[in-house]
Amino acid sequence: MSPLSTLKFIKNNKRHTFSSALAIVTAIVFLFIFECFIESMMQSAYYATASVLERQIEISPAGSKTLNENIISGVKSSADIEKIIPALTQETAFNIFGAGGTTQVYGLRSSDVSYFLRQHGSKLKEGRLPISKDEIAIDMHVSKNRKLKIGDSMGNKVDKLDSLAGKYTVVGILEGIDCVSITSDPFTDLKNVDENTILENGLIAFPKPGRLEAAGNDLKQYSNEDVNVYTLSWMNSIFDDSVESIKVMDTIAIIAIIVMAVCLVCSKYAQFYNRKAEFGILYAMGFSRKSIMLRALREVMMVNLGSFIIGLSLGILSCVFIIGDLYSKSGGLPVFICEKAVVLSIIAPLFTTLFTLIPVFRMLSSVDPVTVIEAN
Amino acid sequence: MEFNIEKLNLIYDMDKAAQTIGLRDVNLALSGNRLVGILGPSGSGKSSLLYCMAGLRRQTSGNVSFEGHSYKDMSTAKLAALRRSDFGFVFQRHFLVEYMTILDNVLTPVNASSKKMRDKALNLLGRLGIEELANKKPHQLSGGQRQKAAIARALINEPKVIFGDEPTASLDHASAREVMKLLDEYKQNAMVLIVTHDESILDNADTIIRIWDGAISSVQNKEEGATA
């Protein structure tokens, strides 16, 4: 290694290099875990509550009311709808680390169950589908989240904090694209009535392929104080509102990066300033200002690039262990790498490099070897 | 090698009301391998003359040329390249880089670490009697040893001219004599220019230039006697 090489400098200044790198690595690891945690929280919450709406639209009466005939016939006649099935929609608790919430539980006619499961890419992983009264097959994520296995009981008669009315016995575990849980047929008492009467209790409309948005736009006209129409666009607007608070946290994260960068920049500038005599003598010896500046550039970039790579690797590993542990075990969807985390992780070393080099270059461009010589 | 200085003037603080004249109307011609002493009291302009000759300061007026190349026609980058290829420097303070070993400090002007250069550097340190200190850091050496390392650094690129600005000022008498002995030996290979206020170290100088208040008062060549 030549005496003025960057690797030689790092080798001879391990303590300084380590302290500079440590600040950046710590910032990146913290940001990575923070952003992946938020992403895991959002994705888990979305999976639990919203993913079903990528394949269906739910219309249910508010309170103890029923859906009127006009709504039912309007939905049936919609050109964007492929099939309608009656459904009694309830919720059960699904608490993810960082966010409390619920997920849907559907009471379906026995004849509609296989179509419903097929639409959501869901199949039986364990046990059987509910047949007898007060039986339930739950999504495997719900099973992990609530630590329920086949044979266990759930509902607000078992746990007062659960929003699922009654007491159900878990007979099956479902696994699929969406988080769906189904109870035994709640319409057994309505076997001999016409379908519209059953549909008055609530329905699920499945759009034709590629017509989800159009169907949602068509059916949202029925939404009023007595009727709830749940579409994907409606759910996304709910999520967008919650994302606003996340943006505040992102702003705080960026401010934290800037503060870290400023502190590091001051420290790095001081280190370069203390080497003014070295740079002055190099210039006296005949090294051009350009070569001296390039040397400074390489030193800063190599340390920051190395810090970024180490920080990113440790960030991903930390997410695998911390978030993986928190979310996988609780039935959530862990995220180990997300775009925002990578972008924010790049910002830390980028800011530091830029804001270090600007004052350092200004200092190096004005270093006068004669002043250095005579000052000593 | 040959230096020609014509009507050299150096004025500091040109843009201020109170200007300082560093050099006034200096004319000088130096050639050949020799030890040249530039002697004068503090503030007389001897270091200013050295800086102009080394290309570290641009003259206000007049001209300095080295081997026929005028500094006026050379860009800052070209002057830097000239210093790197043809000049070596020894200052009052050693200016060794504290985090580098002595060997790396010696190799700095050539910025190379090939076996050939390392052997050359070790050979130089050996001739200066400090080869065993090659892997030490500067703070582990005495003042005299550091100055010897600085001399080795100045010699590594086989310069045509060595500029010494008060190279013995911060040394004890014994170390000062040793350093001057080494520089005196090197005058067989190059022009050695020593700026000092201590005439006692210039016993073996071939030329002594006396400078007073920015102007040369006399140039004394050993073989010729004093000239005005």
Image (cartoon, coloured by chain):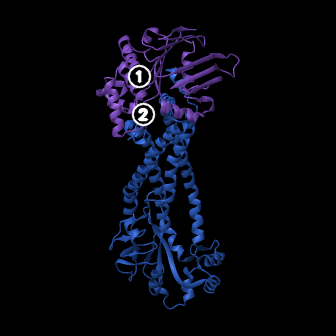
Chain colours: A blue, B purple
Q: Give the residue displayed 54% in from the left and 48% down from the top.
A: A254
The percent coordinates of residue A213 (x first, y second) are: 61, 75
Relative to A102, residue A279 above or below? above
Task: Work out whether residue A276 or residue B103 is closer to the camera in this orientation and state it.
Answer: B103
Q: Which residue is mark 1?
A: B188
Q: Could you tell me which quadrant the N terminus of chain A lies in?
A: top left
Q: Nearer the viewer, residue A353 or A187?
A: A353
Task: Tell me which corner region of the image, top left, top right, bottom left or bottom right, holds residue A211.
Answer: bottom right
Check disc 2 and give the amino acid type: Thr
Chain identity of mark 2: B
Residues at discs 1 and 2 in contact (Cβ within 8 Å): no
**On the rendered structure, is A321 left or right of A74?**
left
Pointer 1 indicates a residue of which chain? B
Q: In this image, A88 relative to B62: left or right?
A: left
Give the number of the disc on residue B108: 2
Above or below residue B132? Residue A290 is below
